[in-house]
């Protein structure tokens, strides 16, 4: 009997440890967040079983589970929703029903999901696009792109860039009644990475005559060089996105070779010949004092040059927009950046804000003190609607 009670006690303690995530008192609805995180952790652990049992790839199984939350294109009395392809890339289009005599502004949206999951059909993404179209009386184009681990960089970047470039053709803009002087590119997380990257690429493309008016980056991932910034240390076990999971997303963006993931986890993947790039992501000089919190910046430990030779993508500005030089940044449009205090990616967004402002770009930075990664997608939490309102209000004023 005592042995049975001891086993129950141990199992209870293990279950409590698994369920309970220590949260800051800053969170508005801590128990709701804890339950949402528990659901996500359970999905992650169950899908990892496919990898442990060699039945498949963890990220493919993870992405497949998320498709259960997809919704079909559904029009209503306010918005017509259709699906089409831009240069063979699937796109969902939201067009307001109200008739007007002027051209509409447009938002080209890129979903997140670690470059390995998600789509424009996910319920949260669909609702955000629908609300954006309705409140702004704007055309919203939400694009898909091929995913890792089946496809690696630069496929995701090229899919999004080709889709956006197709949309910017004069005849396509005319078809959807879009004002070519009022277009925004926007995205969250990995989508924020891709939004920042394609906005930079457009500056060098002589075939594109249309210039973006704004870009909006929602808790973006912007560099995989230094994965030991203050935010990655402080938030390594925070809800939704742990440091280890983000490192897995980064490494799988470039390869299924787990040796890159191992090197990234130890922050020893950049070769010495690329050491000059660290000045572009040096958080000790790019973060405001309040975010340093006594963290001491140390000289990076350099990694094997073989990894960079085999997988040069992690040193490519198209994968790491923070690596752009100042001359490139100066040409970027008015920018919105949303960062969250309890997010491993917090410092990426803040460093980009600093570099953009230093380059003379007009930037609105919304920092959410009680925010966490992916907050806009958790529609059962109040914070989601608060951040969505802030984002759409900024678009209303600036697009």
Image (cartoon, rainbow, N blue to C red):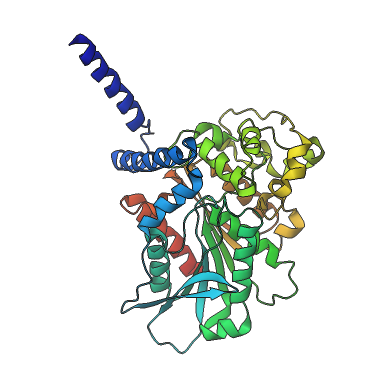
Give the side of residue 107 with respect to residue 267, left or right. left
Give the side of residue 112 with respect to residue 165, left or right. left
Q: Residue at x 73, y 38 (%)?
A: 270
Q: Is residue 90 above or below residue 293?
A: below
Q: Residue at x 70, y 55 (%)?
A: 359
Q: Is residue 171 above or below residue 372?
A: below
Q: Residue at x 31, y 27 (%)?
A: 15
Q: Give the image location of residue 391, x and y in percent.
A: 45, 60
Image quadrant where residue 302 sits: top right
Could one spot residue 48 in this view of the protein?
A: yes
Q: Residue at x 43, y 58 (%)?
A: 390
Q: Residue furthest left?
A: 1
Q: Give the image location of residue 78, x and y in percent.
A: 34, 78
Judge by depth and name the residue closer to the eye, 5 or 225: 5
Which quadrant, please, contains the N terminus? top left
Q: Give the image location of residue 176, x and y in percent.
A: 51, 82
Judge by depth and name the residue closer to the eye, 128 or 325: 128
Q: Give the image location of residue 258, x and y in percent.
A: 62, 37
Q: Residue furthest right?
A: 273
Give the side of residue 145 with respect to residue 354, left or right. left
Q: Is residue 154 above or below residue 368?
A: below
Could one spot residue 20 in this view of the protein?
A: no
User: How many numbered circles does the render carry?
Assistant: 0
Judge by depth and name the residue closer to the eye, 54 or 120: 54
Q: Residue furthest top?
A: 2
Image quadrant where residue 22 sits: top left
């Amino acid at each position: 009997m005592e042995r049975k009670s001891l086993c129950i006690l141990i199992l209870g303690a293990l279950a409590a440890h698994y369920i309970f995530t220590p949260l800051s008192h800053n969170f508005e609805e801590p128990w709701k967040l804890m339950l949402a995180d528990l659901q996500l952790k359970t999905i992650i652990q169950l899908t990892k079983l496919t990898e442990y049992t060699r039945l498949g790839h963890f990220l493919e199984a993870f992405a497949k589970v998320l498709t259960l939350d997809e919704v079909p294109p559904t029009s209503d009395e306010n918005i017509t929703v259709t699906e089409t392809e831009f240069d063979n890339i699937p796109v969902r289009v939201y067009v307001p029903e109200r008739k007007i005599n002027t051209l509409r502004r447009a938002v080209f949206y890129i979903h997140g999901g670690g470059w390995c999951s998600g789509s424009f059909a996910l319920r949260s993404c669909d609702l955000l696009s629908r609300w954006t179209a309705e409140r702004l009386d704007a055309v919203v184009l939400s694009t898909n792109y091929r995913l890792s681990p089946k496809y690696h960089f630069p496929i995701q970047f090229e899919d999004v860039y080709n889709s956006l470039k197709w949309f910017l053709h004069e005849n396509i803009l005319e078809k959807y009644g879009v004002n070519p002087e009022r277009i925004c590119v926007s995205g969250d997380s990995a989508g924020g990475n891709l939004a920042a990257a394609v906005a930079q690429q457009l500056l060098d493309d002589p075939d594109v005559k249309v210039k973006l008016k704004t870009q909006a980056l929602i808790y973006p991932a912007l560099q995989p060089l230094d994965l030991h910034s203050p935010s990655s240390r402080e938030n390594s076990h925070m809800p939704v996105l742990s440091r280890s999971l983000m490192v897995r997303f980064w490494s799988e963006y470039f390869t299924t070779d787990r040796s890159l993931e191992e090197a990234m986890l130890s922050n020893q993947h950049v070769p010495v010949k690329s050491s000059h790039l660290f000045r572009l992501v040096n958080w000790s000089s790019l973060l405001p004092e309040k975010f340093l919190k006594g963290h001491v910046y140390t000289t990076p430990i350099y990694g094997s040059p073989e990894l960079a030779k085999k997988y040069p993508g992690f040193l490519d500005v198209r994968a790491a927009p923070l690596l752009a030089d100042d001359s490139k940044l100066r040409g970027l449009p008015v920018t919105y950046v949303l960062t969250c205090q309890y997010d491993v990616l917090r410092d990426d967004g803040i460093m980009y804000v600093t570099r953009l402002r230093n380059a003379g770009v007009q930037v609105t930075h919304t920092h959410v003190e009680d925010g966490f990664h992916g907050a806009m997608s958790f529609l059962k939490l109040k914070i989601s609607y608060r951040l969505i309102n802030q984002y759409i209000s900024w678009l209303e004023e600036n697009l």
